[in-house]
Image (cartoon, rainbow, N blue to C red):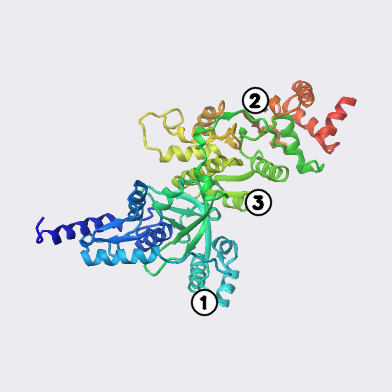
Amino acid sequence: MSSSEEPQSTQAETTRLDAAEAIPSSAADPTAGSGGTDEANAADTAADERSTRTLKLNRNGAEHSEDSSAGGSEESAEARDSEPSSTGEEGEGQSGGRNRRNRNRRNNRREPHVPSENPLSLTELKTKSTQELIDMAADMSIENVARSRKQDIIFSILKRHAKSGEDIYGDGVLEILSDGFGFLRSADSSFLAGPDDIYVSPSQIRRFNLRTGDTVTGMIRPPKDSERYFALLKVSEVNFESPETAKAKILFENLTPLFPDERLTLEKGNGSSEDLTGRIIDLCAPTGKGQRGLLVAPPKAGKTIMMQSMAQAIISNNPECYIIVLLIDERPEEVTEMQRSVGARGAEVVASTFDEPPSRHVQVADMVIEKAKRLVEHKRDVVILLDSITRLARAYNTVVPSSGKVLTGGVDAHALERPKRFFGAARNIEEGGSLSIIATALTETGSKMDEVIYEEFKGTGNMELHLDRKISEKRVYPAINIRRSGTRREELLTGEEELQRMWILRKLLHGMEDLPAIEFLLDKLKDTKSNDEFFRSMKRK
């Protein structure tokens, strides 16, 4: 090559490098409006992730790595993927590319991070009331926040805290978008996209093998002047374990499903009238870890109160279980009641009320089931209480593309595939962990679609609990139809002696009508404090 051609090749090589490093400015969060990803977010995030390495420039200005192995070149490609240029333009020129590489070398040589003495948690700020945040902002000499939104007050507090050199930590459930990057959504806002979401770069997602539904905790920084979102700098935990441990987990789809064989006892044993619901369920439809249960209920039969009672019993008797209450298309006042009765005791309440669009119902349900799967991969016992699967199936029927084949009641032929996949995820895992789903199905609503949805789900569960409208109309609660309720393979959950007594009780009640049977059982249970005492009284008689 002649000397006159040499600068031209160098210029072309630098231009190609700049083009490879540039990230289109159109990469934005589609759920939160335009401009969702700022280039500085990705640059700071990638600088924190890259391993320290020394770069040399040859006389032509070309970049060479000291480590010429395949791993080193792969790491360099990953870094380029997450390092946008400051202008977003290609062909910045040889001097611009050299300046950027100089900045990269300075970032690589910076000293290890030393934790600050007063770290601040974004999650803790979200749990505070608006007045507490205003008082906190006043103590930090932040002005004009009294009439600001709660998210804006949190933004101002974190920005002032970061300027003082203190660390900020946050967590959330990862949602990976189609562009390759993701955001950590908050369960407090039912995974709704908001200004306090945390941006996660594509390189971090690849490095830690993250998937949608992973619960990620780490150090973050507030957005700069031209940015919109918090950015994740360092990952400290994935699904409540170290990131390195999370990499080796087996995918949920590859785990082996089994029948439930470990009991979820719903009886509290305190002899209270509120304990009658759990005691009757233990007698007629015992529940285990990994149960796929269907709570079939007509309107005004007390299904919401029964779900609350079941959640409270699982919290009391099985504290090792991670409980998620998912409310779809419900009334706002019922969401508040569930949050105060169950959420205050440790359960996670996620809701999408009836005034939300069907696409919002679907997004919430997808986030919940993905989070549950990731926890089960870490051998956790997860329980999802869904109210209701009928309204969730209605939402899927609205958002699914039309296949041209419509079933009875206006249900699209492909509309029930995704809700069946949701319900079918419940299973006991041979390798450890379990996912239990107790979902309500609406009947006798006057809608042909609801009847079709119930018929489609009727044979898919391994436990059914039926509520009776005639019993509830007489204000007898719980309005359980004992004859129609039951559990498949219940012998795996109960002892042989207890199973024999449960069968004797069923034979006794089978000769009665539904209403006299539940009234008779309630009267006998009120005379005893526990089911064991009730069985002993049966033996004496």
Q: Secondary structure at mark 2?
A: loop
Inspect this view and state whether residue 137 appears.
Answer: yes
Q: Determine which quarter of the picture holds residue 438.
A: top right
Quadrant in which the C terminus appears = top right
Return the x and y of residue 469 as percentages of the image width and height: 66, 34
Horizontal arrangement in the rendering, residue 199 relative to residue 131 (left or right): left
Q: Secondary structure at mark 3?
A: loop
Q: Which amino acid lies under the numbered mark 2 shown in the image of this protein?
A: Arg
Horizontal arrangement in the rendering, residue 453 relative to residue 88 (left or right): right
Asked whether 100 or 280 is in front, the reply is: 100
Q: Which amino acid lies under the numbered mark 3 shown in the image of this protein?
A: Gly
Return the x and y of residue 193 as percentages of the image width and height: 46, 55
| Residue drawn at (51%, 37%) of the image | 250
**Looking at the image, is mark 3 or mark 2 earlier in the sequence?**
3
Return the x and y of residue 265 as percentages of the image width and height: 72, 37
Q: Which residue is mark 3?
A: 346
Image position of 188 with respect to 279: above or below: below
Q: Which mark is residue 488?
A: 2
The alpha-carbon separation of the residues under discs 3 and 2 comes to: 30 Å
| Residue drawn at (61%, 53%) of the image | 336
Quadrant in which the N terminus appears = bottom left
User: Label 2: few (<14), some or many (≥20) within 10 Å?
Assistant: some
Q: Secondary structure at mark 1?
A: loop
| Residue drawn at (52%, 65%) of the image | 168
User: Label 3: few (<14), some or many (≥20) within 10 Å?
Assistant: some
**Looking at the image, is mark 1 or mark 2 earlier in the sequence?**
1
Image position of 475 with respect to 64: above or below: above
Q: Which residue is mark 1?
A: 142
